[in-house]
Image (cartoon, rainbow, N blue to C red):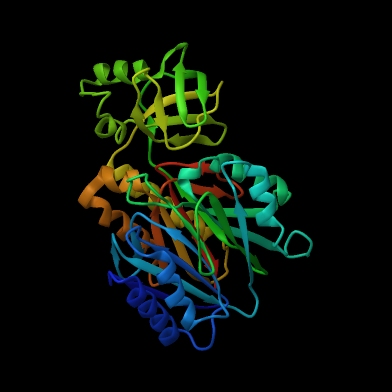
């Protein structure tokens, strides 16, 4: 497989799109089969997509808004980056699911309707999935995609970002800018793809039962208003907690849903006057959860392990390129140390090219991993050469 990476910090969307298109053309002979684009929320995305597409009109183009953009050579916020793919052996298709907030099942069926691997015999099936994070229902979408594909696909990706402003997040298909939607790039390969997942969080409190919840609203824990569990934990560990401004506390004290494969993380975001905790993703009623803690060192180790796991999944096949998705909350929590996390991925990848972004939620479904939609979790996918 031939690849090209591109990165620009040009603020003008049209100029940025042309810059990305020219970089891809300089690195990759001929027309790419597919281009993956991540772009900061400040861009006029339609103009950006149009300019990029004008250089490579035959390429399938997918992507999303993001909360931080990077390659193996550069990183920043307010930038745009792209990965171009061309292969004689790997085949690509794009699926789009609209009206996600109305029906995750319908959106999943729309996406899979254009997939070719559901009918053909192919050894390795995967899909990059990007979803409008503010539309919600991402966990349900992943479950419905697993059903619609007969659980034969590895899934990886994330929720579109807007620098944690939670105002508008969008996904891209061709030159379309879509909200309340999800897009997927189907990848059919004769060689395996590697997906690795890690988060570096550990339980910091006793288990609690989710007794009431509604979508993103966590209402009750152990029969009491959800906020009281966080207030009690803050008192126990001796740190301040202000329900009116809870994010500084929540960044270091998130929720972990107990699963057979480990903790699936959920990021609390705010508290309303009734003591309801609003989260970045759904927390199921009846699940057992714990308040979690982490350190910078633990986050770095988790990223290294996720990258190593993705590489190991290829066996003795040569890796070609990597995609890395990380969480906006992680970037805010560790601040200036975030460059260490990117360095940890790059060091494990050695000279392998890499493109990725900071997302509002991460998607991973792969054999031997805890599956679904996550928060505060690193996801690495390595494609074969």
Percent across and percent down for residue 34 are 55, 73
Q: Is residue 287 above or below residue 282?
A: above
In this view of the protein, which residue sits in the foreground, 302 or 116? 116
Q: Look at 54% across and 69% down and name the residue there.
A: 174
| Residue at x 39%, y 42% (from the top left corner) | 376
Figure check: 15 above or below 174: below
Residue name at image x 36 percent, y 52 percent = 162
Q: Nearer the viewer, residue 247 or 311?
A: 247
Residue 225 on image: x %, y %: 40, 15
Q: Picture coordinates of residue 190 (x, y %)?
A: 68, 69
Q: From the viewer's perspective, is residue 252 above or below residue 156?
A: above
Residue 171 as seen in the image, left or right of residue 33: left
- Relative to the observer, which residue lies in front, 221 or 324? 221
Horizontal side of residue 101 vs 355, given as left or right: right
Residue 55 spot, x, y in % from top left: 47, 83
In this rendering, would 94 be left or right of 288? right
Q: Residue at x 52, y 26 (%)?
A: 214
Quarter-wise, where is residue 354 in the image? Answer: bottom left
Q: Is any atom of residue 4 visible in this view?
A: no
- Tell me the quarter of the image containing the C terminus: bottom right
């Amino acid at each position: 497989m031939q690849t090209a990476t591109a990165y620009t910090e040009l603020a003008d969307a049209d100029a940025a799109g042309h810059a990305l298109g020219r970089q891809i053309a300089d690195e990759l002979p001929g027309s790419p089969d597919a281009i993956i684009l991540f772009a900061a929320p400040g861009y006029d995305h339609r103009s950006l997509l149009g300019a990029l597409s004008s250089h490579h009109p035959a390429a399938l183009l997918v992507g999303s808004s993001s909360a931080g953009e990077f390659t193996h050579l550069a990183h920043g916020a307010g930038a745009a980056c792209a990965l171009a793919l061309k292969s004689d052996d790997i085949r690509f298709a794009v699926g789009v699911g609209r009206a996600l907030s109305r029906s995750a099942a319908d959106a999943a069926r729309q996406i899979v309707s254009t997939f070719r691997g559901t009918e053909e015999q192919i050894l390795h099936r995967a899909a990059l999935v990007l979803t409008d994070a503010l539309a919600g229902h991402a966990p349900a979408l992943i479950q419905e995609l697993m059903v619609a594909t007969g659980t034969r696909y590895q899934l990886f990706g994330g929720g579109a970002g807007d620098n944690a402003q939670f105002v508008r997040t969008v996904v891209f298909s061709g030159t379309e800018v879509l909200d309340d939607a999800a897009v997927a790039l189907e990848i059919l390969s004769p060689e395996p793809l590697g997906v690795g997942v890690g988060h570096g969080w550990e339980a910091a409190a006793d288990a609690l039962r989710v007794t009431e919840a509604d979508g993103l609203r966590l209402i009750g824990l152990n029969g009491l208003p959800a906020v009281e569990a966080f207030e009690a934990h803050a008192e126990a560990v001796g740190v301040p907690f202000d329900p009116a401004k809870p994010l500084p506390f929540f960044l270091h004290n998130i929720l972990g849903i107990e699963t057979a494969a480990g903790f699936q993380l959920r990021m609390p975001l705010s508290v309303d006057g009734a003591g309801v905790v609003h989260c970045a993703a759904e927390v199921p009623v009846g699940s057992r959860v714990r308040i979690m803690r982490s350190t910078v060192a633990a986050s770095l180790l988790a990223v290294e392990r996720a990258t190593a796991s993705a590489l190991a999944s290829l066996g003795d096949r040569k890796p070609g390129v990597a995609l890395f998705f990380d969480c906006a909350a992680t970037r805010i929590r560790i601040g200036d140390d975030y460059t260490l996390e990117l360095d940890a991925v790059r060091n494990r990848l050695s000279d392998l090219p890499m493109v990725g972004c900071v997302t509002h939620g991460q998607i991973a479904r792969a054999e031997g991993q805890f599956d679904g939609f996550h928060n505060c979790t690193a996801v690495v996918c390595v494609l074969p050469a």
